[in-house]
Image: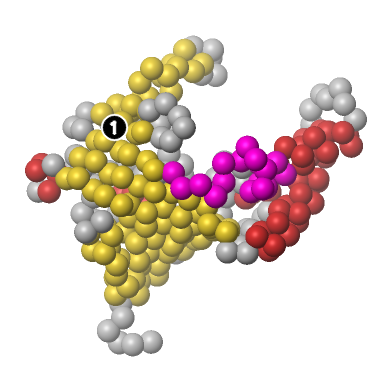
Amino acid sequence: MKKNIFLFIYLVSILSFSQEKPELFIGEIYTTQSMVYEDRESYMKSVDDYMLVLDSVATVEYLNSKQKQTLEDYKEQTKFGYKIALDPNFSGSGWDKTSVYKHTITDSLVRIDIPMRSKMIIEKHNFNIKGRKEFNKDFVEVPVKYRFNEVPIEELIIDKTDTRIIAGIECYKVKVVQKGERIVRHFYWNYIKEARVITEMYVTDKISTYFNTIIKNKPILNKFYPMYIKRYSTAFKGFYLMSEVTKVNFNEFSKN
């Protein structure tokens, strides 16, 4: 390894860098997001293998719940639902499409414009989503919170010698290894114990905000802001989720 390469490897837990940082960024962030298939045959083989795991999971769920249908029917129904959700050839899946997200961040609110869905407005001081309510465990109606996750980080690799200019901002490379993280909502990695989710990023410390299209892990966002993301799982071959910031509009306050 070259002497001028500074590669920092941390085996960390959330407590290692959980210190809160101030929300300094005010402006707009435009981001594209898409699912990229490198090898559809390998991916569909991974889906078939996943169905075998779901078979045993569905059996446990069936035995622990009161179901009117037979075990075999329950297993087939469970696998069919996941097969539809995971199959990119299914007409209603919406996969293989590039979506554009816009985050508009003020000193008190965050507005997220999401393709094919209504906008989301979040109060920065408490992370409440405006206009949305839910019932808590005591059946009391409370505001819906913008949800972060606390999936432990097994490995964090920072390489500041590997740089890239993204949306006019110089970024450096970070790699994160986690267990139990998801790529999209359909993938429950804890069903496959040995699976790990790998997130390769180019990040900046010039943007300080907790709002990102893919990364919802506060400890990561406390360290830096991901400008480019490639996320994939060791359990699923042939595809990855990609996100890239295409434009950043700073206001004068957030530049300071």
| Residue named by callout 1 | 110
Q: Helix, strand or loop at disc 1?
A: strand
* Residue 152 seen anywhere in this rendered image of the structure: no
Q: Is residue 156 left or right of residue 57?
A: left
**Quarter assignment of residue 132:** top left
Q: Which residue is drawn at 31% across and 52% down?
A: 246
Q: In this view, does 68 lie above or below 13?
A: above
**Residue 221 pos. (x, y %):** 34, 49
Magenta highlight: main SS: loop
Is 90 contained in the magenta span?
Answer: yes
Tell which of 143 and 11 is nearer to you: 143
Q: How crowded is mark 1: few (under 14 residues within 10 Å), some or many (20 or more)?
A: many
Which of the image's four quarters has the N terminus? bottom left
**Residue 84 pos. (x, y %):** 70, 41
Q: Residue at x 30, y 38 (%)?
A: 103
**Residue 19 pos. (x, y %):** 30, 47
Q: Is residue 188 left or right of residue 143?
A: right
Magenta residues?
83-99
Residue at the top extreme? 140
**Quarter assignment of residue 228:** bottom left
Q: Which amino acid does label 1 sit on?
A: Val
Is 178 contained in the magenta span?
Answer: no
Q: Is residue 78 left or right of residue 18?
A: right
**Quarter assignment of residue 200:** bottom left
Q: Which residue is drawn at 33% across and 26% down?
A: 121
Residue at the bottom extreme? 2
* Residue 221 seen anywhere in this rendered image of the structure: yes
